[in-house]
Image (cartoon, rainbow, N blue to C red):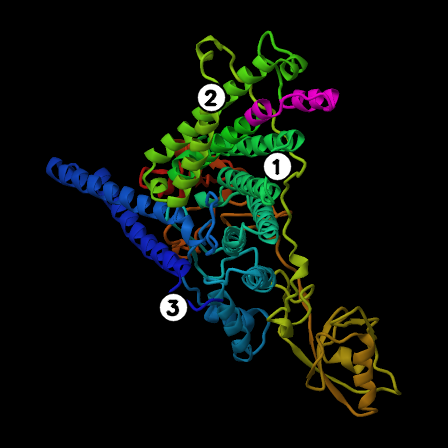
Amino acid sequence: GCNPLAETGRSKLQSQRAVLNQQILRAVRMRAGAENLLRATTNNKVREQVLLELSFVNSDLQILKEELEGLNISVEVYQNTEETFSIPLVPLGLKETKEVDFTLPLKDFILEHYSEDSSEYEDEIADLMDLRQACRTPSRDEAGIEMLISYFLQLGYVENRFFPPTRHMGVLFTWYDSFTGVPVCQQNLLLEKASILFNIGALYTQIGTRCNRQTQAGLENAVDAFQRAAGVLSYLKETFTHTPSYDMSPAMLNVLVKMMLAQAQECVFEQIGLPGIRNEFFTLVKMTQEVAKVGEVYMLVNTAMNQEPVKENIPYSWSKLAQIKSDHYKALAHYFIATILCDHELQSGDDEDQQEKALSQLYDYMPEGLMVLTVLKDKVQRKQLGKAHLRKAIVHHEEALRVCGLCKKLRNIDVLQEVLTAAHKRSLLKYAQQETEDDFLSLIQAPDILPKTEHKIETIAPQFSKVKVKDFFHRLGPLTVFSAKQRWTAPRTIHIHHEAGELGFSLKGGSPVQIYCLDPACSAASMGLKEGDYIVSVGGVDCKWLGVNEVLEKFRSVGEQPIEIEVISCQDTAASMHSKSATYSVGMQKTYSLICLAMEEDKIDQTKKAPLKLPFLSWGTKNRQKAASTLCLPSAVAGSSRMKKKLSPFTLLNTESSLY
């Protein structure tokens, strides 16, 4: 990872984000306490004081949220340092997290579950914690992406080795919402995996915005980065569907995927126009369709951003920037077609049919009384339609400038103002060059332009297989056998004596090998060796990763001398139940969402009989209309007629003091 103390623009923004997250956490706790006191007290004087305090806290929260939005729209920090005259692209900020200490939980589990000396695995645990710490400040390049993917894949090994499905490990993961700053704390590794995936997508967006958009190679890299960002976010949406954080909710991820694909489409248009746009009929037709496509995708992004439940949490300036880009690129489309009509009259040597076909592809319909071929041949109609398109272009330019002026954050982005103003002046100049005497007679309304692109933009799925990682805890043995789901006896020492050159048993399987066809009358059986036991050590040498031939070779190497082996027996495991969590992976049963600042679940009296959990999700009544509302975990005793009156400890989250 990068040096966390490096004074770069990006690191300063992340540091400010971390400070804001802590301030938001304090304000949320203050609000929750005040709301609890308001419900508990009956004293009118106290209620008045609490209501006054609540108004102050809510004002503070609103101010902090606006400051966080300011960080999210600080796009100039992430842009390429080269002088450019392009509208800025929007990156995603990395999710912040707290430090996690794996040492005690993993060492205890190694000793208890694997019956091994946990002190021998201190280096592996330290490597895991160092990798996690480095992932908090990844470098903005392929090396940073590879490091995040390495940690994500390493979490898969850690989950299988140390996180059984029947209990919590006592490791609390805390991640802050990148849009609201509200923390989400859970004792479930799936929250960690989902957050790392989000940061992989966010880092791809930062790489895309950093590319030099004045070169073909830079634009190609930007398109690729935004497509990969969309692919990672789409994978996150499909794989972890019940995340408790707004920034990773399906609705929000759907909007973010659309935004990344729109930015990729914008870079494609810039790539086509980078060599220069020739003032030629068919070239302008192609550019008109391409830029109309960019305007259309940004219009869809703006529409999605203004839908519930995303509208409340998406940065306001992002929504306005999408609207500005939609109007700006629609205006360019009308400007290009106006240039076609005003500057390219049909000449005797031109291919009339080809021009008619090309122009007709731009329109879904023609204004009443006009035909494409007639417009091409009639100079007056051609000029009237061209001026109608210029008027529409000017309207779109003025709307983009108006919206930009209304948004405080966007007003301060100089290059955005410069690009919009220059495009507006160009359209005004083009309109002024046309004859204006008959303007009052022209009632033609310019029709909408059909978008079309020859460069289809799609998501690129994450390719985790390209990053090779080695399991830190490789020494515990093959994961197919030595996992948190399996339970065994402690290693037993068996002294093997050769009887007439025979061991009294056979070996089978891969690694580790199993005892097979055990002779119940042999000396090994009398010492406790059982059919199906796994051999984990021969002569004091670990052999969990050895096959049948290697183990037999060790037996042969001692000749007729007695040899000591260690074996373990697999125990029957109870039917596993997935614990309550924020997320679930493909192939796993759905699990429950839980938003909390801390989980005290382990304090529940274990002697009481746990109530049966209903196999479905129940939305909290007060939060049904909210987008990412807290989920209520129903609790009931089988056969009880008073089931509805029993409350689960998690239903407390459905009150007005819930985080969202």
* Distance from the alpha carbon under mark 1 to that under mark 3: 49 Å
Q: Are marks 1 and 3 in contact (CB under 8 Å)?
A: no
Badge 2: few (under 14), some or many (20 or more) residues near its Cα, within 10 Å? many
- Going by the image, does 597 lie left or right of 370? left
In terms of depth relative to the viewer, which is nearer, 332 or 315? 332
Q: Classify 83 as above or below 151.
A: above
Provide residue 92's location: percent of width, then percent of height: 47, 49
Q: Classify 569 as above or below 580.
A: below
Disc 1 or 3, which lies upstream in sequence?
3
Q: Are marks 2 and 1 in contact (CB under 8 Å)?
A: no
Mark 3 or 2, which is nearer the eye?
A: 2
The residue under label 2 is 391
Q: Main secondary structure of the magenta part?
A: helix
* Distance from the alpha carbon under mark 2 to that under mark 1: 23 Å
Question: Which amino acid type is marked by label 1?
Answer: Arg
Badge 3: few (under 14), some or many (20 or more) residues near its Cα, within 10 Å? few
Identify the residue shown where x is 36% and y is 51%: 597
Mark 1 lies on a secondary structure that is: loop
Mark 3 lies on a secondary structure that is: loop
Mark 2 lies on a secondary structure that is: helix
Disc 3 or 2, which lies upstream in sequence?
3
Question: Which amino acid type is marked by label 3?
Answer: Leu
Query: Disc number at residue 278?
Result: 1
Mark 2 or 1, which is nearer the eye?
A: 1
Provide residue 656's location: percent of width, then percent of height: 32, 37
Badge 1: few (under 14), some or many (20 or more) residues near its Cα, within 10 Å? few
Question: Which amino acid type is marked by label 2?
Answer: Arg
For the record, the magenta segment spans 338-362
In terms of depth relative to the viewer, which is nearer, 603 or 436? 436
Provide residue 643's location: percent of width, then percent of height: 44, 35
Query: Disc number at residue 5?
Result: 3
